[in-house]
Amino acid sequence: MQINERLINWASLIEDETLQQAEKASRLPFIHPHIALMPDAHLGKGATVGSVIPTLGALIPAAVGVDIGCGMAAVRTQYRVEDLPPNLTALRTSIEQAIPLSAGGYNTRLTESARHRVEKLATSFDPGRYAKNWQLQLGSLGSGNHFIEVCRDEKSRVWLFLHSGSRGVGNKIASHHIQVARNLMAQRRIDLPDPDLAYLDEGTDEFAAYLRELRWAQDFALANRDEMMDRVVACFAEFAGGPVEEVERVQCHHNYTEQETHFGKRVWLSRKGAINAEKGVPGLIPGSMGDASYVVVGKGNAMALNSSPHGAGRAYSRTKARKTFTRAQLREAMKGIEYRDTDAFLDEIPHAYKPIDVVMRDAADLVSIRHTLRQLVNVKGD
């Protein structure tokens, strides 16, 4: 852990540019008391991915990011690995057919359960002005580092695990408010260390509108994961030949803002690529494609603002990964895991990420590990 007055860094593996980006944000006058940089920190838009940013009287839309409410969900079933047949291809393909994958991949119609979830997302604003088909986005995965997995834990118990967010509608909401904030900074001639650190002042109409739509997108992301998990459970039950008992379900956001009290003041705490690690709070920290993931519980580290990493964190940009690694290396990294063998996943190869064991070692004073998960099946969008 490296400490200065405005920035505390838990990452032992970190690029100079990432530190410089976080230091720029830490100089904003309304930061209280400091920014906490998680072990998986890497460059982001305006604000660093893997940073926890507490603010007084203001919100920075880019400190949440464009995938509002992105997070993970995991279900432990009553099944064990030995209960499953050795060939899991049919399970993977059934999941791929049940859930739309990739950017722009949405449902053609709403299932009954999705319709109920859409009805619960009744709102005081019209999400249709951002995405006319927002209802059909509910229950879709997306691409990049979003995934659906079937895993085994250290006792050979089967878990269902997924990672996704608020999809296209959340992205457009976030992008709109980032631009609103930038326009306000220009109008007020406020000079910032990075234009994407533009902020909205509490008490203004712009702040209220962002907060209202941010919270809606967080709710949408949660409903999206619930809808997908229900479909994954149904696919797994059909494949296993019997009903699934949900022994445990864990949920956590990692791109969001909430009001919390830290170091004696009520702040707006934005976790961008970080999860809530208050003492006793369960969480999920996935590794990269083909690597271990973890079910954890928070230790409530005050200096870390009760937060922990949300994953492995990129070491290579997507472009650099595609230029550096080969499909043969991807196949070797995914040996023993049922996945769709395609060049499209080269930018998600485990080598493009920080080693998850290093990240977890750096996070030892932030969380305790409850379970270690290893993939049996991996589903991703192109």
Image: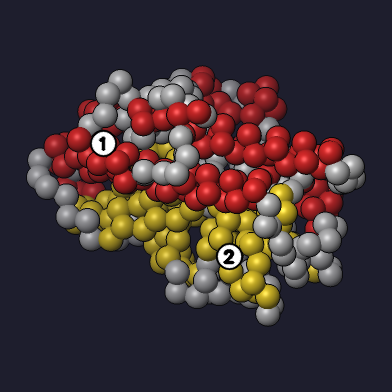
How crowded pointer 2 is (Cα within 10 Å; few <14, some 14-19, many 20+) is rated as few
Q: Where residue 33 sits: x, y (%)?
A: 75, 70
Considering only order in the chain, which callout, 2 or 1, is on the residue closer to the N terminus? 1
In the rendered view, tell whether residue 121 sits above or below residue 373. above
In terms of image quadrants, where is residue 26?
bottom right
Q: Residue at x 70, y 27 (%)?
A: 320
Q: Where residue 307 sits: x, y (%)?
A: 58, 64
Q: Where residue 214 sits: x, y (%)?
A: 54, 47
Model colouring: secondary structure
Q: Which residue is drawn at 41% across and 44% down?
A: 123
Q: Where residue 262 sits: x, y (%)?
A: 65, 74
Q: Residue at x 58, y 46 (%)?
A: 209
Element under label 1? helix
* Three-letter residue code for mark 1: Arg
Residue 357 can be seen in this image: no
In terms of image quadrants, where is residue 275?
bottom right
Residue 111 can be seen in this image: yes
How crowded pointer 1 is (Cα within 10 Å; few <14, some 14-19, many 20+) is rated as some
Q: Answer left or right for 336 relative to 65.
A: left
Residue 259: mark: 2
Residue 316: mark: none
Residue 115: mark: 1
Query: Between 14 and 218, which is closer to the camera in this rendering?
Result: 218
Pick the quarter of the image with the N terminus: bottom right
Query: Distance between the Cα atoms at labels 1 and 2?
Result: 31 Å
* Three-letter residue code for mark 2: Gln
Query: Between 31 and 141, which is closer to the camera in this rendering?
Result: 31
